[in-house]
Amino acid sequence: MSLIPLAAFTRLRAGYGGAGEITPDHPISESVLGACNHLIIWTFGAVFLFVLTSAFAQEQEKPPARSISPDGKWQFRAAAAGEQEDFVIAKAGSDESSLVLSEEEYADGLAEALGRAPSYANIVWGPDSKRFAFNLQPGKAYQTVQFYQFDGNTWRKLDSLESNDATFAPLERSMAKQKKKLKLPREDSGWPIMTSWQVREWMDPSTALIYAHSQKNFEIKNETESVRASFFFTLKFDAVGKWRIIRTHEVLPKGVGGLNAEERKEISTIESEDRELRSK
């Protein structure tokens, strides 16, 4: 069907109250009108295709969300093409970053490692979406966690685990006892396999459960011995985001004695993850 009538028409010629009629003004060649129709259709199609292609390209440039907050308002994703940062927090459905998790926080190609092993960098959201823990690996043998709190308009970084010696001391004491049992010289520091702090879950909006693990290997009479220690730490946050440790408990090599229900559930999950990792 033609988009333009075959002839241009004048306005209605009718007397007041008359039936009136519509008459052609001056005929135009159908071939000319047909060419005009084709031009209009082609132009409209080209514009539509350009808009559609541009929208698709923009959507393709924005990486998919790796994690969504419980309230659905925030997403954790890799930075979009052209951005300098590795990871960002953005409002759901928005191209703009609300918080930059700078590439300066990482080392050893974490962006590449994320694609192969997402556990190296992930978000654990608080149940009310007002806080989150960012688990990351800034070094080959070191994993840690950063905390952020939403203060109405912006995300604010809270004190790090490294700011409190109480997160390190239990691990060091446990490993020192094992070194003494193996009769290792004090100056023999061994070589680190992994030291890791990882938030496993938020038990409520202000309480986070952390699993800490450290392992070093030592050469003893041409044999390699491992010294390792594992702990659960329970952190409590106040209204302004200051945290303190309210529970510390060592995970013994055998058995789950002394662990509470949440810790038992998490150690079972951790052991399953380790078995799966070793099987690959």
Image (cartoon, rainbow, N blue to C red):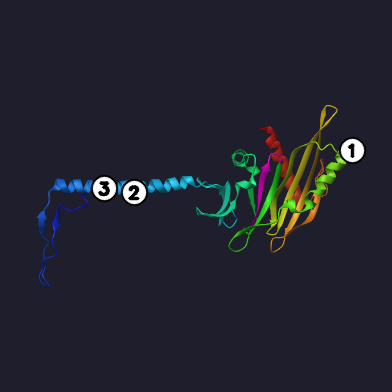
Answer whether residue 18 is visible to the viewer in this image.
yes
Which image quarter holds the C terminus? Answer: top right
Q: Disc 3 versus disc 2: distance between alpha carbons?
A: 10 Å
Residue nearest the observer in this picture, 128 or 61: 61
Residue that carries the numbered disc 1 in the rendered image: 181
Residue that carries the numbered disc 2 in the rendered image: 48
Query: What is the three-letter code of the residue carrying label 3?
Result: Ile
- Mark 1 secondary-structure assignment: helix
Q: Residue 67 carries which label?
A: none
Q: Residue 237 at what x, y percent from top left?
A: 72, 60
Query: What is the three-letter code of the residue carrying label 1?
Result: Lys
Query: What is the three-letter code of the residue carrying label 2?
Result: Phe
Residue in the picture at 80% in, 42% down: 229
- Mark 2 secondary-structure assignment: helix
Residue that carries the numbered disc 3 in the rendered image: 41
Q: For residue 128: magenta?
A: no
Q: Which region is colored magenta? A: 131-141
